[in-house]
Amino acid sequence: MARNKFDIDETLETPFDIKHLRRALVYAGKYKKTIALSLLISVAAAVVSLLSPLIIQYAVDNCMTAERIPYLIGCAAALFLCIVTSVLLSQKRAKMMTRVGQDIVYDIRRDLFKHMQELPFEYYDSRPHGKILVRVINYVNSISDLMTNGIINFILEMVNLLIIVVFMFFLCWQLALVVLCGLPIYAAIIIFIKNHQRKAWQKVSNKSSNLNAYLHESIVGVQISQVFTREDVNAEINDKLAKSYRSSWMKAVGYSNLVWPSTDIVSIITRAAIYLVGLVFLPGLSLGTILAMGEYSARFWQPLMNLSNLMNTFINAVAYLERIFEMLDEPVKIKDKDGAKEMPPIKGDVHFRDVTFSYEDGTSVLEHLSFDVKAGQSIALVGPTGAGKTTIVSLISRFYDLDSGKVLIDDSDISQVTLHSLRSQMGIMLQDSFIFSGTIMDNLKYGRLDATDEEAREACRIVGIDNYIRSLKDGYNTVVSERGAGLSQGQKQLIALARTILSDPKILVLDEATSSIDAKTERNLQNGLNHLLKGRTSFIIAHRLSTIRNCDRIMYISNKGITESGTHDELIAKRGDYYKLYTAQAV
């Protein structure tokens, strides 16, 4: 059961937890030297920039007469130099931190994808895939700005604020106190806005996640939608989700847009107070000092506005980081055990020893199952839907761990060997013949990159798809889209089968490998498969019993185990479950 659907919001409204930010900073630690240098450059740029008001003060108070024009020109040149130097230093810092931030985001995204490749099947079965994509793409992108400039900017703005306060008190402590009187009013306004703003942006994230999930589902199921003429209904659902996103976004932007005018209003009031106090209550102050304090006052409020925005970024980013780290912390249930050894070259003997397995606690699919298969034998698994046929071959490949018992290949317990050494010697074709975007040749070599083109073509000849591929304009270099759009289901199945054959497995698993192939193609394919299966242990699951008559042994799976086992003729003579199934298909 999916944890949530496209129309159910994920819970993102969690308290601010600094531990997630600290965990993200572990990624930043790799680049601490560059970050430290960037911070030094930022401080230098800030100090140079703050010299400008002092230059203006000196020019106004001392260089406004005709005989001091050369000094005024010198002040103008110094002011220009300060501005250019500050801009160049800021640009250098921005480039450095952009690279560092993107490197950190790359590291997080790399770790996420690597972890995703190892997560068990049930993780993807229990969540809308669109919401998984939101975490890997949207949420990681959302923290990009935080890791690129957020942390360094937060430190820089605090330093800027401190330097500005020092400059103000150095210039005129009375007017500096006037500026600071606006802080309580500003703090009250920002606290009110931020409490609503954070919740509003988290709601935007929820609605974006829902819209993305439904879009992904709609693209994957577009054929079914058209078959059942659901276009109008789906458009209404999409419209409802899009409107919900738009509404939440407009509300969030409304709160965000209050920050700048609120800061600007408080800044204007304090600057007006500076001129009033300076001109009326402190008549001894020079005009240059009042103008410089007005400039410092304007600059004082800019870091505060930036800090309020950065704090909101931090709070939202921590919510995103929580989801990202939640995914990274998702346990990899099927993994190499401590001390796992490399699987020796497989001969092909397979042994089940008192195996019990369940997907959910308390509901066993297999109980106390035991059987032996000799190397080179072909084994057919038949029985009713849901009896455990696919489960058996999945356990041989160790896609799941057992509740109890053992599965051995040759003399090796598969739970004690590395997954790569086990699965690399097996060829597994599942019911879903997935075709990746790329050329047909890319798909054929997906499981064996060192295969030659001739070996790939030979695998296609065995399954009977070679002539069709050659008839295409670009032959084996024909580009197919994701899921093999443009290919019939049978053609996709044959290409997937050729891909499995090309891997040259010691144990071959075919789960409904010919279910989408017509009878004529299947007869041609059967000759190639009979040649292929010689000397190779194989497990074949097929509902069309005509395809498995020649198998060395047929096992009927039912009632959580094997109820019948033997050759086709032996089971027909028994007149048991297999006989009933076979004769029912023959009617």
Image (cartoon, rainbow, N blue to C red):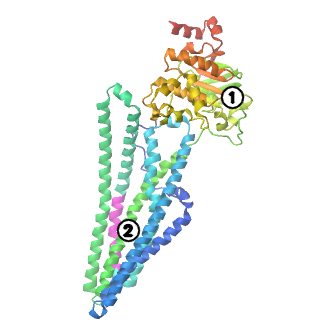
Kind of residue sitting beneath label 1: Gly
Could you classify mark 1 by the number of other residues whose Cα lies within 10 Å: few (under 14), some (14-19), or many (20 or more)? some
Seen from the viewer's position, the closer of residues 63 and 80 is: 80
Q: Which mark is residue 273?
A: none
Residue furthest bottom in the image: 67
Seen from the viewer's position, the closer of residues 167 and 509 is: 509
**Which residue is drawn at the image coordinates 32% and 29% (left, top)?**
230
Residue furthest right in the image: 411
Residue 411 image-quadrant placement: top right
Residue under label 2, please give it: 304
Residue 213 image-quadrant placement: top left
Where is 488 relative to 103, above or below?
above
Query: Which residues, given as a range, are shown in magenta?
Result: 176-194
Where is 544 relative to 209, above or below?
above
**Which residue is drawn at the image coordinates 45% and 47% (left, top)?**
137
Residue under label 1, please give it: 405
Q: Is residue 553 covered in magenta?
A: no
Magenta stretch, overall SS = helix
Residue 279 visible to an observer of this rendering: yes
Q: Is residue 182 covered in magenta?
A: yes
Marker count (numbered) = 2
- Measure the alpha-carbon separation of dots 2 and 1: 65 Å
Where is 540 relative to 473, above or below?
above
In the picture, measured across the screen, residue 481 lies left or right of residue 256, that is: right
